[in-house]
Image (spheres, grey):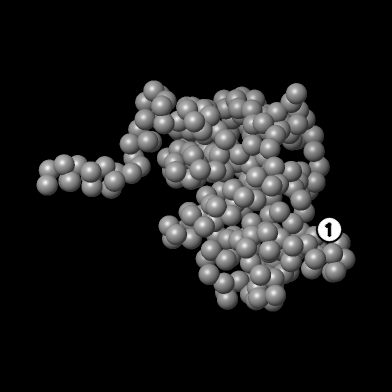
Amino acid sequence: MSAAIEFRNASVALPQGQLLLADISLALDEGTTTAVLGRSGSGKTTLLRTVNRMIELTGGEVLINGKPIVDFDLIGLRRNMGYVVQETGLFPHFTVERNVGVVLEIQGRAPSERARRSHELLEAVGLDPTTFSKRYPHQLSGGQRQRVGLARALAAKPAFLLMDEPFGALDPLTRIEMQDMLLKLLDTLKKTVILVTHDLDEALFLAHRVVLLSQGKLIANVGRDEVMTSQDPEIQSYIKAYHRGERKSISTKGHA
């Protein structure tokens, strides 16, 4: 059976020769969430954007259900991929309802269908449509805007969800609420998801597999339950970067 998304020796090079991605080979199973970790500049977002061809490969290929993405109609390819970014990209002069249904509007769907789907998705992401549908983005909190952005990404019922640090700008408590909401949604919807994140805790909470990139190269591809016991030095370094305050607190108590 073909992987839902597969990278075969995928490479991206700048005109001057610098490699942003170097020979990435990776297969993602249907209905799973894969978290992509790495330092800033490691190639995480570049890898994500090759899937919807926002960045074109200079070597290798990406396949969707066994078919090279270059063989798909570009508009059709992107409409089958929900895309969620940190800043949401909501249209400031559109209401929440119209922002959620904008892809359906572009597809020529009837206003009644767009309104019904928008309200359905607002409820799914925890926003009461009677309260929020007629508001504008500037009338929402950061977490509420991120919920609207997620609802919009799901409007056309895409098979794939590409998420580029979607909760990176949120405060810790709102971030936890968003993670809980997303996990419940994904358990129901069974999308194939790529989640770019810097947060190891977020990766372990949301993903089935964790991929680690460094300088455009694939360093590790392990199951969620294998991460904390991995002997890979790059993964161990990433683990050590988290919970430093917790370790310091324990150490301080030991010297009290």
Image point 69% across, 47% down: which residue? 188
Few, some or many C-alpha atoms within 10 Å of disc 1 (few <14, some 14-19, many ≥20)? few
Up-down: is 9 above or below 18?
above
Image point 67% across, 31% down: which residue? 29
Residue 19 in sight here = no
Pick the quarter of the image with the N terminus: top right
Give the x, y percent position of residue 171.
Answer: 44, 60
Q: Amino acid at mark 1?
A: Gln
The quadrant in which residue 101 appears is bottom right
Q: Nearer the viewer, residue 71 or 195?
A: 195
Q: Nearer the viewer, residue 191 or 85?
A: 191
Give the x, y percent position of residue 46.
Answer: 56, 41
Image point 58% across, 65% down: which residue? 145
Determine the secondary structure under disc 1.
loop
Give the x, y percent position of residue 222.
Answer: 51, 27
Image point 12% across, 43% down: which residue? 255
Residue 35 in sight here = yes
Say whether residue 256 is left or right of residue 81: left
Label 1 sits on residue: 107
